[in-house]
Amino acid sequence: MRILINTLAILTLVACVREEKGSTGVSVTTSDQGFSQTNEDGDTLGLITRPSGVLMTHNPNYRLTPIYKLKYNKRGDYYYIGSTRFHTNYSSYSRLEENQWNNNFMPGFAAAYGEDMLNLSHYDVEQKQEKLFFEELVLIKTVYYPSYSTDTLNSEAVSRDYYMISVYDEDTNEDGYINWKDLRRLYHFDQTEVTGTPLIPKEYAVLSSEYDPGNDFMYVYARKDENENGQSELEEPISVWWIDLKDPQRTGFLYGWGR
């Protein structure tokens, strides 16, 4: 079983790398061919985005809409956007009778992702107010949000009232693009105000994560940018951080302090 779990973890990490490398990202100037469009008069229209579906959170008062980059084929005769997909968890823990995770990545959390997701819209049904999670140009990797399903952990209902987003939010390597070559960050967002705070220090590049059902912790693997060149490199050390999902402001090192 241990070998199987480790193999699945490696395959998941490889899949994440492939998915990231398939994304071209966005130009920080939004003026490159393929990132901005022009009309018939040759006027630059800038970066064009489109919504794709609505994410149903557990609280019916809040709905999320992923926003994707509009992309054209090489001939320019049709356009397309990314589709929203979901990480699932089929581990032995999730199949226990007392753990009904409804195939979510973690109990109480759905995890959505999609190629070239550039922002996320938060809508308050009661107040009829919309707000974007990010004011600046970003490239979202994964959105963790309260699942629509009612999940249980150790026979207890799990309730989440916040969001977590892993995102490339800065051209850290200064190559003119925001993409998977930059440092990936992880933020906590309040459910109502949609204000973000870092869960992992910004000098680290978030690599992957896993779930600990015994503590209701999320473990995050992150590589420190020791040479401060704004990119993650194999020779740089990897640390493992824990995040208490009952209180995500509680975080710490599981492995790697001082390395």
Image: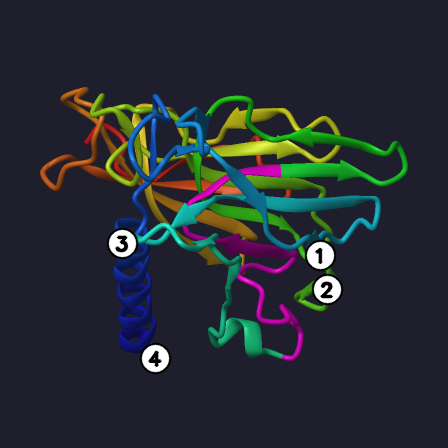
> Dot 3: few (<14), some (14–19), or many (≥20) neighbours within 10 Å?
some
Res. 29 image quadrant: top left
Residue 58 higher or lower than 201, as above or below: below
- How far apart are the two marked residues, 4 and 2, measured between alpha carbons? 28 Å
Q: Nearer the viewer, mark 3 or mark 2?
A: 3
Amino acid found under the numbered disc labelled 3: Val
- Say which residue appears at 60% left-offset and 31% top-offset: 133
Secondary structure at badge 3 equals: helix
Left or right for 152, reference 35: right
Residue 18 higher or lower than 63, as above or below: below
Amino acid found under the numbered disc labelled 1: Val
Q: Nearer the viewer, mark 3 or mark 1?
A: 3
Q: Which SS type dominates the magenta stretch?
A: loop
Amino acid found under the numbered disc labelled 2: Ser
- Say which residue appears at 58% left-offset and 36% top-offset: 248
| Residue 79 is covered by the magenta coloring | no
Query: What residue is pinned by disc 2?
Result: 149
- Nearest to N terminus: mark 4 or mark 2: 4
Residue 18: x percent and y percent? Answer: 26, 57
